[in-house]
Amino acid sequence: MEKISNFNGVGVPFRYSNVDTDQIIPAIYLKRIAKTGYEDGLFSTLRQDPDFVLNQPEYKNAQVLVAGSDFGTGSSREHAVWALRDYGFKAVFSPKFADIFRSNCGKQGVIAGVISNADTVKLWEKMESEPGIELEVDLPSQVVRCGELEINFDIDEYTKWRLSEGLDDIGITLQNEDKIEEFESRRAAWRPKTLPVKGD
Amino acid sequence: MAEKLTLAEKLWRDHLVVKGEDGAPDLIYIDLHLIHEVTSPQAFDGLRLEGRDIRRRDLTIATEDHNTPTKDIHLPIAEPTSAKQVQALRDNTEEYGVRIHSLGDKNQGIVHVVGPQLGLTMPGITVVCGDSHTSTHGAFGALAMGIGTSEVEHVLATQTLPLAPFKTMAINVEGSLRPGVSAKDIILAIIAKIGTGGGQGYVLEYRGSAIRELSMEGRMTICNMSIEAGARAGMVAPDQITFDYLKGRPHAPEGKDWDEAMEYWKTLQTDEGAEFDKEIYIDADELDPFVTWGTNPGQGVSLLGEVPSPDSFDLASDQESAEKALQYMDLVPGTKMKDIRVDTVFLGSCTNSRIEDLRAAANLVKGKKLAEGLTMMVVPGSQKVRIEAESEGLDKIFKDFGAEWRFAGCSACLGMNPDKVGEFKRAASTSNRNFVGRQGKNARTHLVSPVVAAATAIRGTLSAPSDLED
């Protein structure tokens, strides 16, 4: 994963709350077996409307999505993050994220930053008054800047550290392989095993 | 004196491999990893790219469910992308030596029906799957949660997951359900009460006399939809009903192992005096059958009620989302829920496709005819359920009624296989999500219990079983 520190990118005022992952990418796009190329599925239903915000030329190279509350609810599909990432988004801000979605973002180098409801509205208004304005996302100091606005965002320390260092979770875990082995050596015999196959 | 712990905290303690320091998450051991074709191909690719092997193939099991057709299953899968995804699972499991139950196999079915029926799901274990409805397995007193594809790869490679500790929420459901009211109504009422984000960051523990009275099937229905309240996991403490359900299943412990397990399982209750971070209360005596009117599972109401007006909500965002939902659902505020006519009824999904669900619906439709102009599809959760239902003659009851009797799979719960609700058609569905487009493009979903689905199929409008007595 690439290391992330500061970046500037066009922001999108995404005035929707309760956006489930079925809306971010419908199930029909989940049939692929590749890990990239999901940008065409992003918000595919909403994008059929010519007035939809992402269809406006000002937001063509958008990199920062500012959404309403309860973003990424529902299905665990990591494809939702892949679609955002492949479309070019490097950060999403919302007052509230669904747990699995937020965790999936952290694995794919996408910042999921929590901001207050009031700050969300301020950002929307600023971006709508100057469509296509760039936001500066400053991960080390957990601040997003837009014009005169300077807004703090929350992200858990561990995810921030991993994103900043571009670290792979599996690699980090395997540093503790001896502890996993030790745990397994005490695992009770009654605990489930799928092999050998039992029953008919 | 020992620390007072909740059930979820006990399981966390007993699966802790490494305690995280300085803000790092804890490393938690995973007892059982379930896999299906949709969220696993990229995980296997990841392993391949890094030259990593599966750490514990003996704790891993795969089944095909999301993409699989539910009729003509002897033919090759017609849709090329579905066929490719299923084939990728078959190739991956063969290459890595993972047990798989493929279409046609008698243990094939929805992953959350297959695990419990094989006796792999048991109290006191951790279960994960790349599917948000993994919370189902919490019904056994297991800590079970849905994960993303990167996490699937992580579990394949390490049999562990780095997880930040959760908060705990007790959902106390006291009293007794009235006739015609079931587990599905309890969970729909809970979600309507706490909202689709209300459980976020929590593990839910369902407690109280109404939960204790439920069968394992009912408990699975409730835990299944924990994710619809935003919680990653939901659980019920194991009791004699749990042990009786498990005993004798193919992979349940036997002999000395069973005794040892029982000794541990009996400790799996929240300690007297342990504190939850949050508690909520539901009065089971007062519950009516519950149905959704909108486009998220929190937009539900008593079946005796009416379609709400957007103005009745306090928050502007809720008003806006209600307006959009009503437009999509083509509903007018003030309409009585029971006056809403449906086009189709779907009985199935990981929420309500177990034998008890089929029996309850069959019991109502027996000897009756499907309402004029309606279609109905009955999709058992697994091939085992299908075989059991057929041995009891349920297939014949449904077919005589006018419903289609299908093979096992996720079916019309999500638009990934040939089973869909038609465009602008209205469905009474026993599934778990009424999202925009979930059951097919422009399909309108009302989430209901199996008995409400059956009564609706008979009358043609959303109906309670008690309406059949008139």
Image: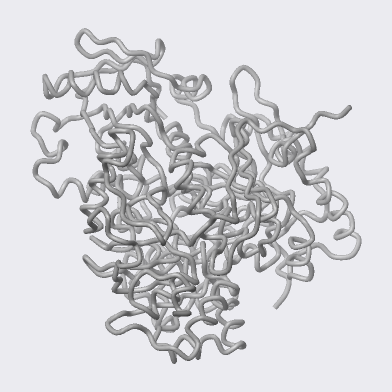
Picture coordinates of residue A23 (x, y %)? 30, 47
Q: Could you tell me residue A48's position as x and y percent?
A: 14, 50
Q: Is residue B387 left or right of residue A104?
A: right
Give the camera-side residue of B35 and B178: B178
**Who is closer to the viewer here, B94 or B398?**
B398
Q: Is residue B201 left or right of residue B254?
A: left
Q: Quadrant of the C terminus of chain B?
A: bottom left
Res A85 → quadrant: top left
Viewer-nearest residue: B108 or A145: A145
Against A26, residue B425 (above or below) is: below
Coloring applied to the structure: one colour
Judged from this view, the residue extending furthest toward the top is: A148
B438 displayed left or right of A8:
right
Q: Is residue B66 visible?
A: yes
Which residue sits furthest front?
B470
The residue depicted at 60 percent of the width and 61 percent of the height is B177
Instruction: Find residue B333 and report its horizontal and vertical position in percent.
Output: 25, 53
Query: From the image, which quarter does the N terminus of chain B lie in?
Result: top right
Q: Residue at x 70, y 56 (%)?
A: B212
Q: Where does the image place residue A27, in percent across and percent down from the top left?
A: 34, 56
Q: Is residue B156 visible?
A: no
Q: Is residue B297 above or below residue A83?
A: below
Count how many numbered circles sit on residues in the image.
0
Residue at 32% across, 64% down: B81
Give me the residue at 51% from left, 19% from top.
Answer: A157
| In this picture, residue A159 sits left or right of residue A138 | right
A116, above or below A86, in the image = above
